[in-house]
Amino acid sequence: MDGSVALVSGGGRGIGFSFVEILVKNGVYVSLLDINIEFGKKAIKQLENDFNAYGRVLFIKCDVTNNDEFEDAFKKTVDTFGKINIVINNAGIMKEYLDLWELTIDLNFKAVVRGTVLGLKYIENKVDINSAVINIASIAGLSNSVLPIYQSTKRAVIEFTKSIGCSYNSEKNGNNIRIMAICPGPTFDGFENNINEKKALEKKIRTLLTSGEENPNPNRILNIQSTEYVKTALFHVMKTGKSGDVWVVENEGTPRLAHFSSQY
């Protein structure tokens, strides 16, 4: 991946920033997209200080729900670095308020579709198997949670990725660009110092993600993991994943491939 160029949406903090970190550390040039200027500038400064990444990282303020802004970010990336090899559609929100349902759908699903389509358009070497679009979903998309809007958008990302990434569509589009999804479990930037607070938060998350199930597994583990495990999973997926794959990374474990039944 050394010398490749990646575009990462929602890269100013959290999981998105952890992706940017590991990419830059491994010699990848990165366009970091974020709607928050403060987060973006702070992220660039940290990358330059930590990895001497001067000239290898570019911050672009971008609202990925805006068609023109999003495509302009792709154009700026090509103008700056000469190409794009990897697109990571990470931007999203988890706000389960019914008055924000349209924004949640626009950001969590429509922007992922838009980013994938733009990736297919702007990725330079469409026959290079190392070229990829990675869509960030969530294990909420695989659960019967009590978060109807959020869960639905993440499930939509999963099904969209499986479909557009299948061999039929790859052959139809005439490219070898792999399109894959990663479903992180509950993930935080850092752990709380108070172990009781951490356990209380894990209990709340477990309730949100399993209360919609008729017979929830009482032994299911849903511990909070650090971003270190998710960013490591990115390289595992990039190295071993096939187009249309959906990968799960939770409980600080090794990434595993999700399997789906064809029955209905």
Image (cartoon, rainbow, N blue to C red):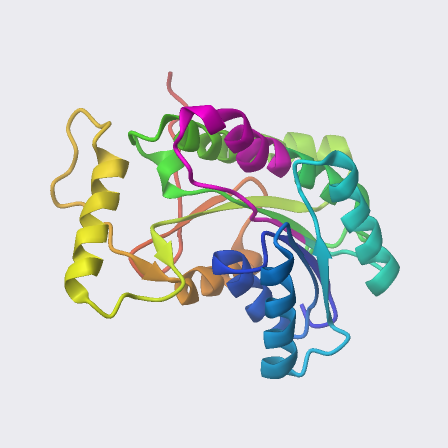
Residue occupying the point 29% across, 32% down = 145
| Number of numbered discs overlaid on the protein picture | 0
Of residue 165 and residue 220, the one placed in the foreground of this image is 220
Q: Position of residue 30 (x, y in %)?
A: 69, 64
Of residue 111 and residue 133, the one placed in the foreground of this image is 111
Residue occupying the point 48% across, 29% down = 100
Where is the N terminus found, in terms of image quarters?
bottom right
Of residue 205 and residue 216, the one placed in the foreground of this image is 205
Where is the C terminus found, in terms of image quarters?
top left
- Asked if residue 259 is among those painted magenta in the image, a careful observer would answer no
In the rendered image of this protein, does residue 126 appear above or below residue 42? above
Q: Which residues are magenta?
A: 87-112
Q: Find the residue positioned furthest to the top.
A: 264
Q: Is residue 23 visible?
A: no
Of residue 248 and residue 30, the one placed in the foreground of this image is 30
Residue occupying the point 69% across, 72% down = 2
Q: Position of residue 26 (x, y in %)?
A: 62, 74
Quadrant location of residue 77? bottom right
Quadrant location of residue 212? top left
Q: Find the residue positioned furthest to the left.
A: 218
Q: Position of residue 170 (x, y in %)?
A: 69, 36
